[in-house]
Amino acid sequence: MPAGGPRGSRPTARGKKRGGRSEDPLARLTRKLDKWIDKNPVLSGLLSVSVVFLLLFLFWQIFGTVLRTVYDTYLKQYADPYVKRVVNFCAPHFVALKDLLGEKRGFVETARRMFVPRDVGVKEL
């Protein structure tokens, strides 16, 4: 004779299913996101960098003209001599590098020519 007790009272290997409504949906989504980040570290890094750049772009689109106006009104007369000095120091390097990369000679030749001095013309601010 079978064991006592009502039929269907044996525990299953799967356990009791809990209703999805009783769990906090934000906690569930956070767990899923954490699992995805653990499984895909490179993609999550790229995603975070792209989100930061998107936020910076949106910030600049929204507040860029305001920042430029405030700079021109209050700081330009004091900061321009220092800014011009730094730009005049750095500009030849960037112009030479841009010219070198524009030649499209290949990686090895470009790397070799990076350390050869060249004459460049720099526009004044």
Image (cartoon, helix red, strand yellow):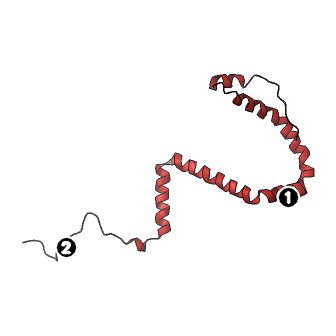
**Height in image: 72 above or below 113?**
below
The one of 69 and 40 positioned closer to us in this rendering: 69
Q: Residue at x 70, y 27 (%)?
A: 103
Q: Amino acid at mark 1?
A: Val
Q: Residue furthest left?
A: 1
Disc 1 secondary structure class? helix
**Residue under label 1:** 70
Residue 28: x percent and y percent? Answer: 46, 65
In the figure, is residue 124 to the left or right of 48?
right
Classify mark 2: helix, strand or loop.
loop
Q: What's the CA distance linking mark 1 and mark 2? A: 76 Å
Q: Quadrant of residue 93?
A: top right
Identified at 74% across, 33% down, the residue is 98
- Residue of label 2: 8
Q: Earlier in the sequence, mark 1 or mark 2?
A: 2
Give me the residue at 46% from left, 55% from top: 35
Quarter containing the C terminus: top right
- 113 relative position to 86: left or right: left
At 36% from the left and 71% from the top, the residue drawn is: 18
Q: Which sits in the foreground, 43 or 23?
A: 43
Question: In terms of image quadrants, where is residue 65?
Answer: bottom right
